[in-house]
Amino acid sequence: MMPPLENAEREHLSGYQRRDWSIVDYQMYEHAGSALSFRGPAPRLKPGEYATCLGAAQTFGCFCETPFPQILQQTLGFEFANFGYGGAGPRFYLRHPSLIELVNKGRFAIIQVMSGRSEDNSLFRSNGLEYLVERSSGARVAADDAYRQLLETYRPHGLPAPVARALRVFHGPPEVRQLLRETRDNWIENYRALFEAIEVPIILLWISKRRPGLHHSGNVFWWWQRYDNVHAMFGKFPQLVNAGMMNALTGDVAHYVECVSSRGSPQPLYDRFTGERTTVDTANDRPDLSQRWTHNPYYPSPEMHEDAAAMLEQACRAFLSARSQ
């Protein structure tokens, strides 16, 4: 567990640029209105002459030279401002009205379906980011570690071993089930608040290796919530988000685009200076997640960004042509 935050409102400033420098230059810049750093090049943001993209690391485009906002910009000849931010959930953007103001000065917005683990509940405060703060102690902890500890404390007693295991896997700790209900309800509430704050048309983008109605961990899909371990419980990105949560949102947006793809994943990593295969130490971004990657197993691959851009193109053209008529 990490020490308490000196300032509880401090943002987690992603170390993607430092971590991935040998592979991609993200051309990071600081947005003056929010004091947050985003992927560049810095957009011009002439009112009515740009679209905005809100989301997490998948919109930012980790390990991708040309993420879907930039592909759309090149394809459509129209500026797309990439405001993707590592670990973000909907509440993160609600906390930054200067970003909402920029969204509303644009033509339309693409909003990614972000993880459910970046949400508050009765035990943890998130500030809309994946780093959580324990309400009782003020200690800072990654979401995976926080929920792993809760799952590991659940030990059904007085039952045959097969029954106890089945309870752990398919029922889980009652307190964790309650936290997940709170978390999912807050996620829906914050998305609805975000949609209400945005005055321009919205395209809601699902980009994932799974469909909303399926849980997916490892190479296995299933229809029900499991509690084997924290990764099984969260599932593949967007973690914790299910079909019911999506059904609560899709009627509130102008378009819903569902991109389910694993093309090009896992993505081999190459040094952009030498062209040779390379290894990335994830501790250069998150010391608590120290791993050495020769492939990108988590974030959308460049091919997945191409798939997302292709699926978004028609809806984007509709907004651009409607304004020109």
Image: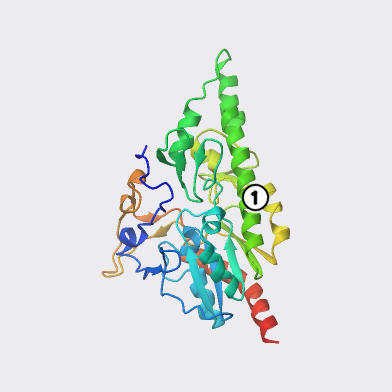
Whole-percent x, y for residue 85 in the image: 46, 60
Is 313 located above or below residue 17 in the figure? below
Q: In the rendered image, is residue 233 in sight? A: yes
Question: Which quarter of the picture shows residue 63?
Answer: bottom left
Query: Which residue is located at x 50 percent, y 42 percent?
Result: 125
The answer to whether residue 281 is above or below residue 183 is below
At 30% across and 53% down in the image, what residue appears? 284
Give the x, y percent position of residue 53: 54, 67
| Residue 295 horizontal/vertical position (percent) | 38, 56
Residue 307 visible? The answer is no
Q: Residues within 10 Å of mark 1 (few under 14, many from 20)?
A: some
Q: Which residue is mark 1?
A: 189
User: Which residue occupies 59% across, 80% down?
Assistant: 48
Q: Position of residue 267 (x, y in %)?
A: 42, 59
Of residue 191 and residue 55, the one placed in the foreground of this image is 191
Label 1 residue SS: helix
In terms of image quadrants, where is residue 224? Answer: top right
Residue 94 is left or right of residue 22, and the answer is right
Of the 4 image quadrants, the one containing the N terminus is: top left
Residue at the left extreme, as displayed: 274
Q: Amino acid at mark 1?
A: Glu
Residue lying furthest bottom in this view? 325
Tell which of 121 and 175 is nearer to you.
121
